[in-house]
Amino acid sequence: MICDLRLCQSQRGVALAVALMILVGVTVVSLTMLTTSMLELVMAGSEEARTTAFQKAQAGIDAVTADRNNFQVFGNVGHKNCSSGFASKYGGTCNATSVTLPSSYDTAGTEMYVRREAPLEQCPPRGMSTSCESYSVATFSMDSRFDATQTRGGRSELVQGYLVLVPKNQQGG
């Protein structure tokens, strides 16, 4: 290519400057995308930990409801039956520590209690196909807490109600 000597000397280095500007722009965009990807990865890990914690707490409730012996109809309203480590970990008082879980259930990080919520004189709710003359209802609440924050896991607490039908004693002749 033939050019005027003065024109060629004034354009020296312009291509280098333009290439460096483009390179800086591409680098900034790449770093922004990398930072966004890292943040999304952390967010996905947090969501997975939250979901796992919720599922573990729900599994605890399911395990407690599978054993009818966890819902003994004795004691007064407020009677609290806890898993073995609940009181020491969360404080408070437990009237009993006999909540049992199946041996197949992984209890690591899960603590729970069952509390009597209402007197036995209640009638069963409508839709249960029972009568108030034949049955009373014992109302319980279950609290299941899963905490794995020590190992960078999630934490969740679920509370669920539970009704136990109790046949009324036949009195009289």
Image (cartoon, rainbow, N blue to C red):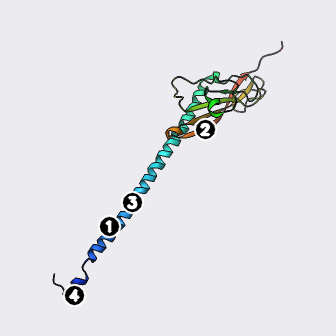
For the residue carrying disc 4, how many other residues have a C-alpha within 10 Å: few (<14), some (14-19), or many (20+)? Answer: few
Give coordinates of residue 76: x percent, y percent.
76, 26
4 and 2 marks in contact (CB < 8 Å): no
Residue that lies at the very extreme toward the top in this rendered image:
173
For the residue carrying disc 1, how many other residues have a C-alpha within 10 Å: few (<14), some (14-19), or many (20+)? Answer: few
Mark 1, secondary structure of its residue: helix
* Rendered image quadrant of residue 127: top right
The quarter of the image holding the C terminus is top right
* Foreground residue among 160 and 136: 160
Q: As drawn, is 45 to the left or to the right of 88?
A: left
Give coordinates of residue 165: x percent, y percent.
70, 25
Label 2 belongs to which residue?
A: 157
Mark 2, secondary structure of its residue: strand
Residue 31: mark in rendering: 3
Circle nearer the N terminus (1, 4) = 4
3 and 2 marks in contact (CB < 8 Å): no
The amino acid at mark 4 is Arg
The amino acid at mark 2 is Glu
Q: How far apart are the two marked residues, 3 and 2, measured between alpha carbons?
A: 39 Å
* Foreground residue among 127 and 5: 5
Q: How far apart are the two marked residues, 1 and 4, measured between alpha carbons?
A: 29 Å
Q: Nearer the viewer, mark 2 or mark 1?
A: 1
1 and 3 marks in contact (CB < 8 Å): no
For the residue carrying disc 2, how many other residues have a C-alpha within 10 Å: few (<14), some (14-19), or many (20+)? Answer: some
Circle nearer the N terminus (3, 2) = 3
The amino acid at mark 3 is Leu
Answer above or below: position of 77 versus 13: above
Label 4 belongs to which residue?
A: 6
Q: How far apart are the two marked residues, 3 and 4, measured between alpha carbons?
A: 41 Å
Label 1 belongs to which residue?
A: 23
Give coordinates of residue 66: x percent, y percent.
59, 25
The amino acid at mark 1 is Leu
